[in-house]
Amino acid sequence: MKLFGKHIGILLAVFFIALTSFAQLSPGELSDVHAHLGGLTNCTKCHELGEKQTSAKCLACHVEIKNLMDQKKGYHASKEVTSQRCAACHGEHYGRDFKLVRMDKDTFDHDLTGFKLEAKHAEINCIDCHKNELIKDDISQKKSSGTYLGMGTDCIDCHTDVHQNSLSQTCTNCHNQQAFVPATGFDHQTTQFPLIGKHREVDCAKCHEKTTLNGKNFQEFAGVEFANCTSCHEDVHNNKFGNDCRQCHDEFSFTQVKNISDFNHNNTDYPLRGKHVAVDCKECHTSGNHTKAVAHNNCTDCHSDYHKGQLAKNGVSPDCNSCHSVNGFSPSSFNLDRHKKTDFALNGAHMATPCFECHKKGEEWNFDFAEINCVTCHENIHENNISSKFMPDSDCRSCHNEEIWNRVEFDHTKTKFNLEGKHKTASCRDCHFTENAGVVTQHFAGLPANCENCHDDIHRGQFNESGKNDCERCHTFNSWLPEKFNHDNARFKIDGKHEGLECIACHKPTDDLIRNYTVYKFEDITCASCH
């Protein structure tokens, strides 16, 4: 037992010395991927005793990189990298979480890998390509630990073959890295169907339509039928002249017709209709060459703008067919619904007004109005009788409407004379119109607001004070009865037997047949004046 205890002590001492020596020799803990190489007994697996350079040891383990370098391929085979020690970029002994491979997209020169990043490839993130499912070659390092090796450099190594193996898999024969479409690198002249004439201007998708192969959709480029024109084009003649369109036409212009005397214009892009049927050919084909294409997209290609740009918006005039037809200039197809979309929508009585009432002055048609208000077309019968406050911008709609002119709706509260009581039912003419010798005169501005301006003073000035009768002292606007008069406020207070007497018992009409009126004011109010 004593001998066994002595041996145990020696072993513990040796272990402590070894542990202390390792702590002094090791510069730090290894990263997670190299953790299995830890311990003093494993140092020589990566290091040569007495040497700083460990690259040879690194490549002995990382055989994929060594093979690429031997083939002078890849990033590590470039002269910029071969001159460096592995440890210069991939340091160790910095702890378990230290990343041996640190990529900075902004500083990493991808050209050294043998795959130059151009156009769209230069814009994407590293992880968009360097992911496990795109690693082509089997490598010794686990993919789960992350690697930038094993990527293919062919297009289909990363991209789906949209042509389903119907064309060469060298995509750059037709496409570039900036955009997949259009296929700028493809020369159709090298095919069995060289493009000439108008065919050079046709979009690829017009002839190469999408089809299905093996349950997948793709655009068909190989095997497209082209034996006859009708393989792609519709026979507008319904096979009346066979399926070889070149008997009459060529690829430079469909309107190039060889037998002009027998030509049916209805087979062109512009069938003749209406008035055009009777027009002589040379009226449109002014060059004398009836097969030369003639502009016909707009009426103004042949006809002058009758309205001289009056209908132009942003400098562009609408085409004539927006209002007229080939059957004749009149009538116009510009209807009420379209007029509602203009700056002056037609409502009420305006809807029944003929166009020429507003738009024709003499022989000329006018559509360009400097101002669009009522007085542009209508006479201002009020002239200067109404303040601009109540008729802003000469707009009659302040009082009138477009349905019935005589229906006046004016807010009299905006004036200095608010309508109350019986005044509300009075006609505007009662106050604002006067007639003399059959001539009606209107008065709106400057009318005095006192009662006798409109009403006769039936009291013949008995209550006139300072040249003005204040009828509202006794009367209201609802009736003429003196509802507001209180006899207690007069010189003669009513009491005793006087109470209950009718007014006319004391206030009797005068005997003047011409100026007959009721006397309300007495100079003598003694008893003897009545009794």
Image: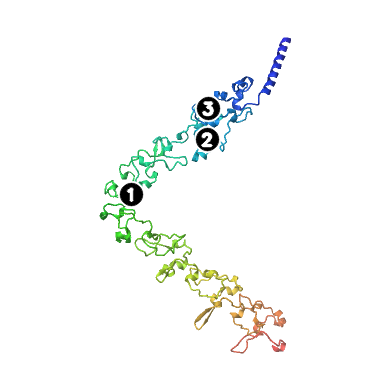
What residue would you read off at disc 2? 110
Q: Label 1 to label 3, Cα distance in Å?
A: 59 Å
> Callout 1: 10 Å neighbours few (<14), some, many (20+)?
few
Q: Earlier in the sequence, mark 1 or mark 3?
A: 3
Seen at 47% across and 62% down, the residue is 342
* Residue 499 locus on image (x, y percent): 69, 80
Q: Is residue 80 visible?
A: yes
The Cα atoms of the two marked residues, 3 and 2, are separated by 16 Å
Q: Is residue 375 left or right of residue 527?
A: left
- Tell me which amino acid carries mark 1: Phe
Badge 3 or badge 2: first in the primary sequence? 3
Residue at 35% across, 38% down: 223
Comparing labels 1 and 3, the label whose residue is closer to the camera: 3
Of residues 233 and 514, the one drawn nearer to the viewer in this rendering: 233
Quadrant containing the C terminus is bottom right
- Residues 484 and 119: in front is 119
Residue farthest to the right?
2
The disc label shown at residue 285, or none: none
Q: Which residue is mark 3?
A: 65
**Which is in the foreground here, disc 1 or disc 2?**
2
Say which quarter of the image contains residue 388.
bottom right
Residue occupied by mark 1: 252
Residue 315 position, x and y percent, is: 45, 60
Residue shown at 33% from the left, 49% from the top: 252
Q: Is residue 217 above or below residue 361?
A: above
